[in-house]
Image (tube, rainbow, N blue to C red):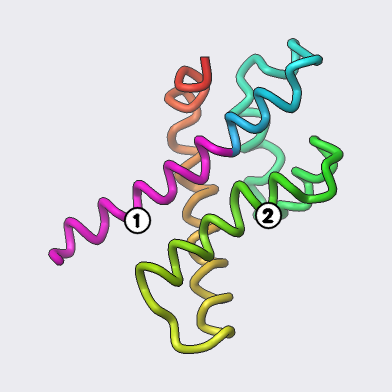
Amino acid sequence: MSKKEDQLKRENALKDMNEFLVMYATRHLNNQAANNHHIAEKIYALIKDGDLTKLDELFKDGGIARKENYTDIAKGFVIDFYGPQSDEETAAMTKSLVHDAINYLGQHLHDLDEWQR
């Protein structure tokens, strides 16, 4: 597989992580319609420092969004794509992918807000 194909697969994982998170937010905050306007921007403002536990506070969901829509997707991609040799390597690579996903979110706010409509 070429480097360009590798990069495309990684970018698709970043996109999936953020699309699932925005979709979850749209559904979860549906009863609070005012909270759905520019939801990607609101999510990014919360987590841009890397603290995903702030999602728990926003959704009051015991960490479902943080785990299922970010961390678990990142970990699954890392395991499937990179095949790390240890739990420590998996954790480090997952943390790096989550960091990249947050940056991706910040760079694609408008696209993700438009996508969720």
| Span highlighted in magenta in the image | 1-20
Which of discs 2 and 1 lies nearer the camera? The answer is 2
- Callout 1 amino acid: Arg
Q: In this view, does 52 lie above or below 91?
A: above
Q: Are marks 2 and 1 in contact (CB under 8 Å)?
A: no
The picture places residue 91, in percent across and down from the top left corner, at 58, 75
Q: Would residue 87 be counted in the magenta stretch?
A: no
- Callout 2 amino acid: Lys
Near-viewer residue (1 or 111): 1
Near-viewer residue (16 or 51): 16
* SS under mark 1: helix
Instruction: Give the labeled residue for mark 1.
Output: 10
Check residue 81 in the rendering and tell me which mark sits there, or answer none.
Answer: none
Quick check: 93 left or right of 37?
A: left
Q: Quadrant of the N terminus?
A: bottom left
Quick check: 21 left or right of 51?
A: left
Instruction: Give the labeled residue for mark 2.
Output: 67
* SS under mark 2: helix
Q: Give the quarter of the image for residue 108.
A: top left
The picture places residue 19, in percent across and down from the top left corner, at 50, 35
- Closer to the N terminus: mark 2 or mark 1? 1
